[in-house]
Amino acid sequence: MKVIDAKNLHYRELNTIIYEAIQKGEKHFRIENVLGQRFIGDGLRGEDILIEVYGTPGNDLAAFMNGPTIRVYGNAQDGVGNTMNAGKIFIHGDAGDVLFYGMRGGEVYIKGDVGYRVGIHMKEYMDFVPKAVIGGCAGDFFGEYMAGGILVLLGLTAQKGEPITGDYLSTGMHGGRIYIRGKVDPSTLGKEAKPFDLDAEDEKILRPLLENFCKEFGYDMKEIMKVPFTKLIPVSKRPYGKHYVPGWHTLTNRKQLVPSSYEENGYPATRSVRDR
Amino acid sequence: MLYQPTVTNFYDFRVVRDQERCIKCQGCVTQCSFEANFWDAEREKIDSIHSKCVGCHRCEAYCPTDAISIQPNPSAFRPHGYWTKREIRNIYLNAETGAIGLTGMGNDMSTQPTYFDRMLFDACQVTNPSIDPLREPMELRTYMGNRGREVPVSPDATKVELSTKLSPLMKLDIPIIFGPMSFGSINLNVQKALAATAQAYGTYWSTGEGGLHRSLYKYGPNTIVQVASGRFGVHEEYLKAGGAIEIKIGQGAKPGIGGHLPGEKVLEEISKTRMIPVGSDAISPAPHHDIYSIEDLRQLIYALKEATRYEKPVSVKVAAVHNIAAIASGIARAGADVIVVDGYRGGTGATPTIVREHTGIPIEIAIAVVDDRLRQEGIRENVGLVAAGGIRSAADALKAIALGADAVYVASAALIAVGCTMCQQCHTGRCAWGITTNDPFLAKRQNPEIATERVSNMLRAWQIEMKEVLGSMGLNAIESLRGNRERLRAVGMTKEEMEVLGLKMAGIGM
């Protein structure tokens, strides 16, 4: 294990130390006194790499990351998991805005609250299904533009009677699933998604994620499961399909231009290129 | 006479067929992907639905007996200088559908000025000799990026060493780069042609925002990999594969709005490259949601530099808009190595017509004001500057360079080289020339080898043309023309226009 004291280190120096150590075969890092250093884990690959961060890492933690595991013992800032492809992140605290932007794979577990625009444009592809579990509450635009993946919000830090999400929840959503512990206030919901009760498949997806969450942060699974979850899924895969028209020539009604007798006689009036 | 609803009247073209010459081979029926030509079995002849014709001339080109000609429809609205055909038809389209009209390619309005056509080059006569590029060396190579303003050396007098650490630069053997066109907007055959040509000519091509197909990784060092707001196909390996990385903020044909590849165009190979499921919409949000300020832009620039260990130049592409000079200054200060400014004539695979025709500013003006501003602030040498959007010829490219650009992006012209006729139907995905379509039946109309040859020929010709014009001006290096507005003169411009462009009126000497 390599121990790095990040005190007074610029992010460029810190990340160079990590990168060069990985080139030499180091797998396990413990970084102490982290205070706002950005881009930790940025663009790193290798599933066997573990980075333990003590303190508060800066923005874009694990951006473009492709495999490693990062554990943060403290709070994280904005842009965690930006366009991340694979790997795991555990944050023993709160995190900031625009988390998991464009994230394509991997898992993120956050113990506390998160800010605005979390899970924006997450997407999935084949075996890549990004998953994120948030123990606390979220700000506005949770799951905006979401195109795939799984977002779970538990609201364990919520005051009694207070909503655990902000406004514009799942606005523009056209893929993926959001699981919210408790009921969703319809007035906060974007018009592209609808709430549903969980079915057997959802339970199967949710259970292992919650188990991981409870194991990492020491919660009781039974306690969490006491409140039923709400599932949000998109109404349409093409939320904006009717907004556009391709152009003039598509308006032509062929039937009005070709005598109907042709088609009545069994001849196709036109031949499509696909017929050949 | 059949009744025709208003919208099917006043179409653009008529497919005029000489029935004497027609041998009824039905080639035109096969070739027309817009289904304008059809075989009329009862009358045993080929006929056309004129209103479906988009004027792409594919059938005309493939008619073995030269029987077809595509002609403008003589039937017209009563001429009106204000309520033009364009305006009337737009209203019909809106009224019929209640939707936004889409279009492809760049702004086609002739009523807006083209400043390139109002600029003329200087040439040597008597008092200074011109250079013959056929017999004398002529340098078109240029390096783009942070070239630095000074070359510090170590203070030790006994041993002189450069203490400069150079930033990565883009090396261009010809100051022409193929502009970003995604796999999806064009097909792999055309992308292969661009990539192979870029490699052969020592320049770059750009992936656009659709990711990089596996078969094109071998062109990596000559590839600009783009990171746009949808982050499609962006992953660590893709970033490391490219020769440069480009953050796409805006596009000249649609400043301020996002992209949208409809689900039906997301076929198997596109799905693999963009890394999204087959058939799902690829929606690029209008802004990058992690960039709301210059500081945020700096964060993404450095996230990309960190991810690639500072080995690759990072460029930022923005549309030319009113405040472009200040924006460009911000981009330079955010740490970008290259700024790409995309003018309002720039092309696209799909854009709302209203945005294409009414948003942005001309590239000539944008480049002039950006170059001025960066010089005034003393940061011009910290960044490369690329003019994009509507570069039609080597002359346009040279004029853009004389106005202050280091290089130009060329995209529409490269498509024209492989057969595009500017019918502006890219957004339909039915391109009869097999360029802006991924329908396998149509896409195979582009043979990658022939397409490579044609694009390469175009670059070779432009290269010779550029050398010829440089030689006539008595210059032997493209660097000597860069920002050298003294070698341009303006015709038919107002005083303000000349002032903004930094040009003198024709007839005014040195």
Image (cartoon, coloured by chain):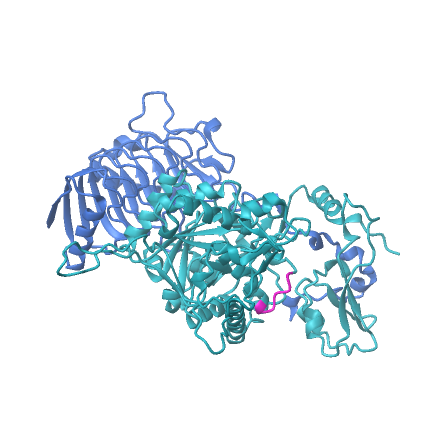
Residue B193 visible: yes
Residue A52 appears left or right of B449: left
Residue found at x 26% / y 37%? A76
Any idea which chain is the blue one in this picture?
A
Residue B409 coordinates in the image, percent (x, y): 49, 59
| Viewer-proximal residue among B418 and A251 | B418
| Viewer-proximal residue among B2 and A152 | B2
| Viewer-proximal residue among B307 and A165 | B307
Residue found at x 31% / y 38%? A78
| Count of numbered marks | 0
Q: Is B483 drawn above or below residue B203 in the view shown?
A: above
Name of the residue lying farthest toward the front: B127
Residue A205 visible: no
Name of the residue lying farthest toward the right: B1
- State the image quarter where residue B215 is shown: bottom left
Residue B337 highlighted magenta (yes or no): no
Q: Main secondary structure of the magenta part?
A: loop
Residue B111 appears left or right of A14: right
Residue B164 appears left or right of B388: left
Q: Is A140 drawn above or below residue B88 in the view shown?
A: above
Instruction: Please report the bounds of the magenta region as a residue range.
Output: B417-422
Q: Is B392 drawn above or below residue B10 in the view shown?
A: below
Residue A237 coordinates in the image, percent (x, y): 51, 46
Residue B234 coordinates in the image, percent (x, y): 38, 54
Any idea which chain is the cyan one in this picture?
B
Q: Quadrant of the C terminus of chain A?
A: bottom right
Residue B448 coordinates in the image, percent (x, y): 51, 73
Residue A215 appears left or right of A264: left
Q: Is A242 drawn above or below residue B12 in the view shown?
A: above
